[in-house]
Amino acid sequence: MKSLLITPLVLLVLLASLNVSADLDKGVAASQEGQYETAFQEFKEAAEQGHASAQFNLGNMYRVGEGVTQDEEEALTWYRLAAEQGYAPAQFNLGLMYRYGDGVLQDDKEAVKWYRLAAEQGASEAQHNLGYMYRYGKGLLKDDKEAVKWYRLAAEQGIVEAQFNTGVMYANGEG
C-alpha cells in the first residue's frame, strides 16, 4: 500500500526535475545565442525552484550585466544560494567576490572559506587560489606546505599558473 502512495510522488518529483532541466537547457542555449532576456527568464524560473546551476547562472548574469542591469549585490545573493547547496562554481565565485571586495567588504578570511569549500570538491582554480592564500598568508596563517599542496592539486589538473608556482616553490625550497 505504501509503495502505491510513494510512486505518484516519485513520478511528480521526476517530472519536476525534467522540467527544471529543460528550463536550464533552454537558458544555456539562449545565453549562447545572445538571447539574454530569454536566458534570464529560464534561469530565473529554475533558480526560484532552488536549482543551484540556475542560481549560479543568474549570479553570473547580474555580475557582468548580461541581459540585466549589473548588480554585484544581486549576483552575491544568487551565488550564495547556489554555494550553500554545495555548488563549487558558485563557492569559487563567492571567494573571488570576497577576495576583491566586489559587492561586499573585502574579506580574505571569507574568501578562504569559500575557496576551500570549492577546492575540496576538486575545483582547480579554487585550489590554485587557496594555494596563493596560504603562500602569502591572506586570510590565514602563511603555510608553504599547504600552499604547495593546493598548488600541486591545481597543477595536476592543468592550471598553468599553479604549475609555475609549484615549480618556483620547489626551486626555492619552500614548502
Image (cartoon, rainbow, N blue to C red):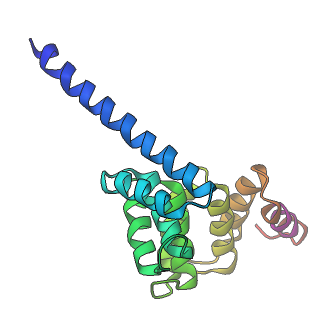
Tell me the magenta residue range. 163-168
Magenta stretch holds residue 10: no
**Outermost residue to the top:** 1
Residue 129: x percent and y percent?
65, 68
In this rendering, the count of numbered labels is 0
Residue closest to the far right: 171
| Residue 119: % across, % down | 58, 57
Horizontal relation, residue 142 to residue 4: left or right? right
Image coordinates of residue 50 in percent, x first then y, are 33, 52
Along the viewing direction, whichever of 69 and 168 lies nearer the viewer: 69
Q: Is residue 119 above or below residue 142?
A: above
Position of the N terminus by quadrant = top left
Residue drawn at 51 percent across, 68 percent down:
61
Identify the residue at horizontal 37%, vertical 38% (top origin).
Answer: 19
Q: Is residue 112 visible?
A: no
Majority secondary structure in the magenta region: helix
Residue extending furthest toward the left: 1
Please, is residue 59 above or below residue 51 in the view?
below
Residue 171 vertical placement versus 120 (above, below): below
Q: Is residue 136 visible?
A: yes
Quarter of the image where one finds residue 128: bottom right
Give yes or no for residue 165 being in the magenta stretch.
Answer: yes
Question: x, y percentage for residue 55?
Answer: 42, 59
In this rendering, the answer to whether 137 lies above or below 67 is: below
- Residue at the far bottom: name it: 105
Q: At x 37% / y 62%, what residue is drawn?
A: 81
